[in-house]
Amino acid sequence: MSLKILYEGKSKRVYVKNEDELVMEFKDDVTAMDGAIKASASGKGVLAARMSAYFFKVLEDNGIETHYIDYDGTRNITVKRLSIVPIEVIVRNYAYGSLLKRMPLYKSLQKLDPPLIEFHYKDDSLHDPLILPEDILNVGLLSRNELDYIVETTLRVNKVLDNIFSSKGLRFVDLKLEFGRDKNGRLIVADEISGDTFRVLDENGNHLDKEIFRKTKDVNIMVKAYIELCKRLGIEVKDVVSS
Ligand SMILES: Nc1ncnc2c1ncn2[C@@H]1O[C@H](COP(=O)(O)OP(=O)(O)OP(=O)(O)O)[C@@H](O)[C@H]1O
Ligand SMILES: [Mg+2]
């Protein structure tokens, strides 16, 4: 790409399009276990981009502001340039993953009603540690109003996605969101929404998300699951070939 690269992460490259806009390029790379397991498969990037564009559009249609600007069907999405709040917001509808390690009295896939919201401080060297809402306020990462807005918006996003997944016979387990501030200080849903950032199960309890890679370490099985999920959601995947 001819644009200036701003950042290269584990799953995306971010380029500067102009003062207000970035292009997120979704790579074919997959990592798990804090980057200890790495793989790559053609189709992965475009599938994650397509899912993200699809969900961002749905959220916008539901009146939730996201960084989404434009998507041309490739692995690239044009987004608003934001200043990312270094917090991962996780919303959980069923107990799974790190929650089961942190609190072993939960049964795997135990229903969480109301959904549980967790905050993690974005710092790879510290393995994105769990933090309390009070920590966020005490250190001034967010104001009280901003924190309330993020909780309320996360629950709204969760509801919208839950309705979609339920209508396709899928069980929506959990989701990670990131937020950023625009130049006016407004908080906006950012980053990506794909099988890399949510967990969803089919009728037989099979993962249609990145968990399948954590379990099998086989990236091609994961790409097949992403294709299946896209088909269920009505996202075009005829041009994506899996090996
Ligand atoms: N609208 C946006 N404006 C600016 N930065 C963004 C925006 N959306 C996402 N980002 C950031 O771009 C990067 C995307 O790259 P990627 O997801 O591959 O990173 P990563 O390896 O997960 O690392 P980390 O998320 O810890 O920085 C992330 O740092 C993400 O926070
Ligand atoms: Mg990321």
Image: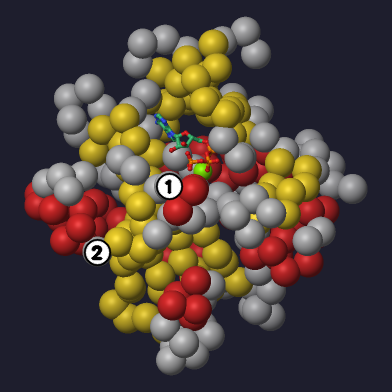
- Residue type at mark 2? Leu
- Residue type at mark 1? Asp
- Say which label, 1 or 2, has the lower sequence index: 1
- Name the residue at the front extreme: 125
- Quarter the N terminus occupies: top right
Say if 9 sits above or below 32 in the image: above
Q: Which label belongs to residue 37?
A: none
- Tell me, yes or no, whether the two marked residues, 1 and 2, touch with CB atoms within 8 Å: no
Q: Quadrant of residue 103?
A: bottom left
Q: Quadrant of residue 42?
A: top right
Q: In front: 213, or 34?
A: 34
Numbered disc 1: secondary structure: loop
Say if 17 sits above or below 145 in the image: above
Mark 1 CB within 8 Å of ligand 1? yes
Q: CA distance from mark 1 to mark 2?
A: 15 Å
In percent of the image, x 31 and y 30: which residue is there?
83
In percent of the image, x 51 and y 38: which residue is there?
53
Residue beneath disc 1: 123
Say if 30 sits above or below 185 in the image: below
Q: Is residue 54 visible?
A: no
The percent coordinates of residue 86 (x first, y second) are: 34, 43
In percent of the image, x 49 and y 43: which residue is there?
192
In the image: residue 205, left or right of residue 220: left
Residue beneath disc 2: 132
